[in-house]
């Protein structure tokens, strides 16, 4: 049985359980005073809004250069993909793989998985709740790793300034890319995995009622 | 019913009875396998020890350059703070704020607040504001990205290696040492144990 059906609220901050009378609004955790909600408020709407903004910014993040390299003779602009291609062709295929996974694969996978999860919840799907919960945990866990490219650019800029050799500066793509990372992380935080299990719980209680046992 | 014997899974809302754990054990949700709570011998003491270590490593990591490069006898080194302030000066405020928040401000908030909670508790003094402090810690947790930053430094140094002679700074070693320590802090930190101590002291 879910806590919500039985009138118990689990605090998401301190995990203390608070019992509440039906119809109470504005519940607070008895132990830590955090606001309690049956489910995160407006979880689906907020996740959608953040995801759509993420999709929009995913385009400039990949099309615009994240880094400009200038030397006495030439200037060069690198997008995330061209940076990976450069690593690959210069022989560091393992680094190219790391950057590809962190910067291209992870953000795309995050957007796709979160979209799938929100849609499945909206359709009240009962398919594989455990699998979907695990997908959510993976998304939450790997999200931070896409910050990799931002840190790479930061260090390159700091170390190659004022050199006669070259100057490196941050491109607009990096700003868009950072925004995608932040937006998808916040989106994952706004999504409520308990919604995945709600259709399950409703179906079970319906079956329990019809068979006359609990 | 005594609610302190119950636990609600944060991931699937399954209501379950708390069970006593063997030391070093972890309780997982019976329905969705989420980690519910852990039991660790002297958990808060370990957290405190690791956090003090992390504080020292953090200070070292931010007092020395991460790396330097040498081109035609021209040497240059930068610390994390240099890197962030340079981004700021060049007008990339968004990127500077993002990097500063995830590598400087969030880790120092985490270290500071854990010390604020655990040092008085270690000497059996009751602290004020346990609830807001734990709430802040929970909120900032995803935004501390030291391990990602460390990987980013490694990637950028490999890239620079092809252009110039790279010298690794002391800070890089401090960052490297800090990562397992911060993971240990996360694994031993158990808010339930803190609440239990607070309840016994008050």
Image (cartoon, helix red, strand yellow):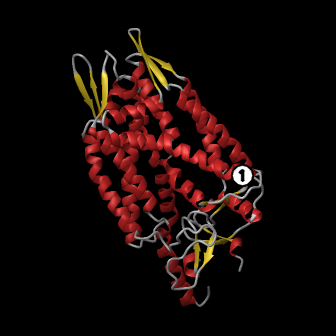
| Residue B58 vertical placement versus B168 (above, below) | below
- Quadrant of the image containing the N terminus of chain B: bottom right
Q: Is residue A94 visible?
A: no
**Quarter assignment of residue A159:** top left
- A3 or B188, which lies in front? B188
Q: Position of residue A84 (x, y in %)?
A: 35, 32
- A191 or A118, which lies in front? A191
- Residue A107 appears left or right of B194: left
Q: Position of residue B80 (x, y in %)?
A: 47, 32
- A24 or B7, which lies in front? A24
Q: Position of residue A171 (x, y in %)?
A: 28, 35
| Residue B29 vertical placement versus B151 (above, below) | below
- Quadrant of the image containing the C terminus of chain B: bottom right
Q: Is residue A122 visible?
A: yes
- A153 or B51, which lies in front? B51
Neighbours of disc 1 within 10 Å: few (<14), some (14-19), many (20+): few
| Residue B181 vertical placement versus A124 (above, below) | above
- Residue A62 appears left or right of A87: left
Disc 1 target residue:
B120
> Which chain does the numbered disc 1 sit on?
B
**Quarter assignment of residue A88:** top left
Q: Residue at x 36, y 55 (%)?
A: A112
Q: Position of residue B46 (x, y in %)?
A: 72, 46
Q: Residue at x 47, y 58 (%)?
A: A136
Helix, strand or loop status at disc 1: helix
**Quarter assignment of residue A14:** bottom right
Number of numbered discs visible in the structure rendering: 1
Q: Residue at x 46, y 71 (%)?
A: A126
């Amino acid at each position: 049985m879910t806590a919500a059906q039985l009138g118990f609220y689990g605090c998401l901050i301190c995990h203390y359980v608070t019992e509440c009378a039906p119809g109470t609004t504005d519940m607070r955790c008895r132990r830590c005073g955090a606001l309690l909600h049956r489910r995160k408020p407006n979880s689906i709407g907020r996740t959608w809004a953040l995801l759509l903004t993420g999709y929009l910014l995913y385009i400039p993040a990949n099309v615009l250069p994240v880094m400009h390299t200038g030397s006495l003779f030439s200037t060069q602009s690198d997008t995330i993909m061209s940076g990976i291609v450069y690593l690959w062709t210069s022989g560091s295929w393992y680094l190219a793989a790391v950057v590809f996974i962190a910067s291209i694969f992870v953000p795309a996978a995050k957007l796709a998985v979160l979209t799938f999860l929100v849609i499945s919840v909206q359709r009240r799907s009962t398919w594989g709740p455990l699998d979907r919960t695990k997908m959510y945990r993976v998304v939450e866990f790997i999200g931070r790793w896409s910050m990799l490219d931002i840190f790479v650019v930061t260090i390159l800029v700091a170390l190659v300034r004022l050199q006669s050799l070259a100057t490196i500066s941050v491109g607009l793509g990096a700003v868009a890319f950072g925004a995608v990372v932040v937006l998808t992380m916040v989106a994952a935080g706004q999504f409520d995995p308990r919604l995945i299990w709600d259709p399950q719980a409703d179906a079970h209680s319906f079956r329990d009622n019809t068979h006359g046992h609990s | 019913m005594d609610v302190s014997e119950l636990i609600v899974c944060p991931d699937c809302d399954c209501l379950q009875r708390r069970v006593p754990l063997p030391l070093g054990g972890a309780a997982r949700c019976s329905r969705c396998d989420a980690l519910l709570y852990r039991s660790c011998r002297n958990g808060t003491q370990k957290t405190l020890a690791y956090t003090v270590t992390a504080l020292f490593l953090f200070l070292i990591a931010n007092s020395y350059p991460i790396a330097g490069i040498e081109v035609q006898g021209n040497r240059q080194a930068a610390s994390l703070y240099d890197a962030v302030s340079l981004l700021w000066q060049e007008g990339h405020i968004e990127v500077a704020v993002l990097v500063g928040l995830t590598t400087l401000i969030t880790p120092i908030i985490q270290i500071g607040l854990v010390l604020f909670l655990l040092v008085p508790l270690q000497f059996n003094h009751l602290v004020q504001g346990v609830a807001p402090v734990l709430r802040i810690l929970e909120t900032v947790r995803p935004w501390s990205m030291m391990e990602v930053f460390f990987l980013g430094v490694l990637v950028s140094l490999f890239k620079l290696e092809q252009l110039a002679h790279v010298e690794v700074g002391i800070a890089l070693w401090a960052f490297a040492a800090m990562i397992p320590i911060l993971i240990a802090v996360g694994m031993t930190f158990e808010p339930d144990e803190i609440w239990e101590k607070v309840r016994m002291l008050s």
